Amino acid sequence: MPSQKFMKTLLIDNGSKHTLELVKFLSENDLDLEIQSYENLNFNINDYGLFVLSGSAHTVGGNDVLFKREVQLILSSKKPIIGICFGFELIAHTFGTKISKLAGKEEGVYSISVTQADGIFGGIKQFDVYEGHRYFVSKVSEPLVEMARSKNGVEILKHKTKPIYGFQFHPEVMVEKQQGNEIFRNLISHLRGF
């Protein structure tokens, strides 16, 4: 008997080089997946139960018009949203958090530590993740809450009252010794209740 698909999910592809890996990863997590490019977004918010905002080669700063539809979604949706890398930065920026540039690109497996206990961590206090970004968040602004951080800044955030989460790292990139995908799977399970 085939597994029952979870909620209908819209993956907004912001031009990430990891889009194929993200599609595979989301599909393996029993999500009924549809993909749309940020350049041609056309959706009814009520048709989906989950929105995933991918990474991008774009920067958040100065691109408000380009990503206007996603910003509107972040501000108005009561449905779950997960931002990955650029999607994380877009969520942070939308709620007034400063995004800063790293001295150089952070790429590879890095260790992050949980700063706020939550069921999505499954009791894990520290874990390794795959990073691939040039920007970082040193401190989140209200109504966002920091959940985990690395030596370079905030790695996981969530909204205080809405089911909005952001991952600075790439849980979809499968490399040895990283547990970011496990945390992401736990989050998917958690969001089944919304």
Image (cartoon, rainbow, N blue to C red):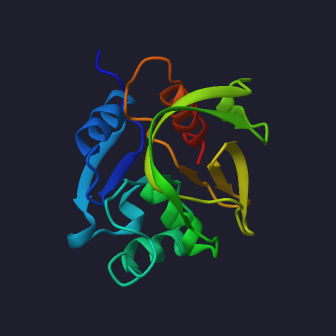
Q: Where is residue 25 in the image (x, y as percent from the top left)?
A: 34, 32
Residue 8, x across and y down, in percent: 36, 47
Q: Which of the two residues, 19 or 120, is positioned nearer the viewer here?
A: 19
41 relative position to 93: left or right: left
The single residue placed furthest to the top in the displayed view is 1
Q: Residue at x 49, y 66 (%)?
A: 90
In the image, residue 126 above or below residue 21: above
Q: Where is residue 99 in the image (x, y as percent from the top left)?
A: 57, 68
Q: Can residue 49 be seen in this view?
A: no
Q: Residue furthest front?
A: 103
Asked whether residue 182 appears in the rendered view, the answer is yes
Q: Which residue is drawn at 22% across and 71% down?
A: 39
Q: Which residue is drawn at 46% across and 74% down?
A: 71
Q: Nearer the viewer, residue 152 or 29?
A: 152
Q: In which quarter of the image is residue 140?
A: bottom right
Q: Which of 27 and 178 is in front in this view?
A: 178
- Seen in the picture, residue 3 relative to 116 is either above or below; the reply is above
145 left or right of 3? right
Q: How many labels does the image show?
A: 0
The percent position of residue 1, horizontal first and vertical second, equals 29, 15
Residue at the (23%, 40%) spot, across then down: 20
Quadrant in the rendering for residue 12:
bottom left
